Image (cartoon, rainbow, N blue to C red):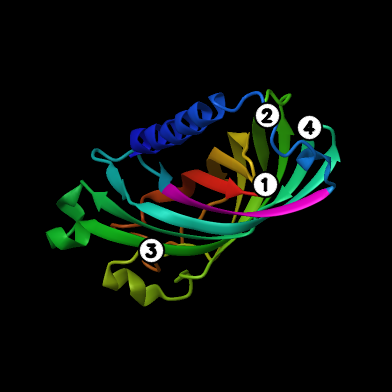
Amino acid sequence: MRTFLLFLTLFFLTTSIYSQRNNVKINNLQNFDQKKVHFGYYIGINNYNYKLDYLLNPNKRTLIREQTGINVGLIGDLKLRKNLNLRFEPGLYTNKSEIVFYDRQNFTKSSDTLRSIKSTYIHLPLLIKYSAKRYNNVKPYLLGGLSTSFNLSSNQNSPEDNNNGVFRLKSNNFYYELGFGIDFYLQYFKFSPSLRGIFSLKNELVPDLDSKSPWTGNINKMSTRAIFINFSFH
């Protein structure tokens, strides 16, 4: 899945660069970067995975099956100085994952070895964008910052959900984010594809009430590792 996401990003970048080559003599949107504040929106896809830290190293580990989710949101951009911007990108992110437990000796039914994670996040990142020098209608950039999210699908206070095959996660989380992208200055707007890594700063797992639970009893910490691909329009 990660290979597919990277391929998709490279495809869009290559297509955009190729389209610019026929028009390099014309600098589009020449005064766009002189604006103190500008706004935009983005759509994209995400791929959520989780890092599991165990109390005791199990003989057989778990498998996390990721599915591609959807991102949509708005962009507020404040110019701090030349090539340095502060960005706020609130958005709605949806995704679904499954956890497969390979060590089946603690389970009475094979169906108990599968647990699902369904999430809908309000994602609130505050980022610093550092841009390289513009070359014709192309400008690469780096992104980094902190973010928080609120899981609208959180079942933190519903211990009975574990009996229904659902993993319980906390309703609020904090992350740091790192990424890169390219601004393409088109005739009427700026198009910016970007690739970003998201890393959780806290434990997201809500353990079962039973400390010897076969699902959560041996998990000390569970934290998000995600990839976002966004296509922004300004």
Q: Residues within 10 Å of mark 1 (few under 14, many from 20)?
A: some
In the rendered view, does 103 fall on the left or right side of 74?
left
Image position of 86 with respect to 9: above or below = below
The residue that mark 2 highlights is 26
Residue 83's disc number: 4
Q: Residue at x 28, y 60 (%)?
A: 115
Amino acid at pointer 2:
Ile
Q: Which residues are magenta?
A: 37-47
How far is disc 4 from disc 2 in space, using C-alphas?
Answer: 21 Å
Residue 146's disc number: 1
How far is disc 4 from disc 3 in space, using C-alphas?
Answer: 38 Å
Q: Residue at x 61, y 35 (%)?
A: 184
The residue that mark 3 highlights is 118
Callout 2: SS: loop
Nearest-to-viewer mark from 1 and 2: 2
Q: Position of residue 95 (x, y in %)?
A: 40, 58
Residue in the foreground of this view, choosing between 232 and 49: 232
